[in-house]
Image (cartoon, rainbow, N blue to C red):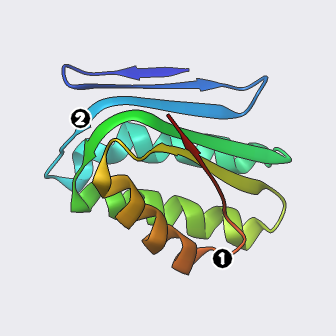
Amino acid sequence: MEIKRENYCITYDPTTAIMTFRGVIRIYEGAEYKAIVDLFKQVADQKPATITLNLQALQSLNSSGMNVFSKFILAVRQYAVSQLVIQGSKQFPWQQKAVNLFLRVMPSLKVAWLS
């Protein structure tokens, strides 16, 4: 599955349950996030043992995007089936701040800092 827009791309590989995010996600209307929300819902509903969010190439995510991610993390936590892993890059300082927020939402979240 793939969501491709001018400034960002999101791919999901159902065989590995890895979602890879690239580019800059700065959407200002909640309705514009529908494709991402739908993808998150599909992934959570599959209830894989592990879900990995690879943010390593995601340069920027605005507050609306943070909200969408937080709701997804809450859904995964409520299902209580999948281990959630975030792979991030210290190259983008916003990711460290976001991960701290996500850890408050789901303390069992695993974090891996890549390159």
Residue 3 tag number: none
Of all residues, the one furthest to the left in this rendering is 28
- Callout count: 2
State whether residue 98 is above or below residue 3: below
- Residue 98 x/y as whole percent: 39, 63
Q: Secondary structure at mark 2?
A: strand
Amino acid type at mark 1:
Pro
Q: Secondary structure at mark 1?
A: loop
- Residue at 21 percent across and 54 percent down: it is 62
- Residue at 44 percent across and 57 percent down: it is 69
Depth check, front residue: 60 or 37: 60
Depth check, front residue: 42 or 110: 110
- Residue at 62 percent across and 73 percent down: it is 106
N-terminal of the pair, mark 2 or mark 1, is 2
Q: Is residue 72 rendered to the left or right of residue 6?
A: right
Judge the density around disc 1: few (<14), some (14-19), many (≥20) Cα neighbours within 10 Å.
few
Amino acid type at mark 2:
Val
Alpha-carbon distance for marks 2 and 1?
26 Å
- Residue 114 x/y as whole percent: 55, 38
Determine which residue is flagged by label 2: 24
- Residue 94 x/y as whole percent: 29, 56
Q: Quadrant of the N terminus?
A: top right
- Residue 43 x/y as whole percent: 65, 42
Residue 107 tag number: 1
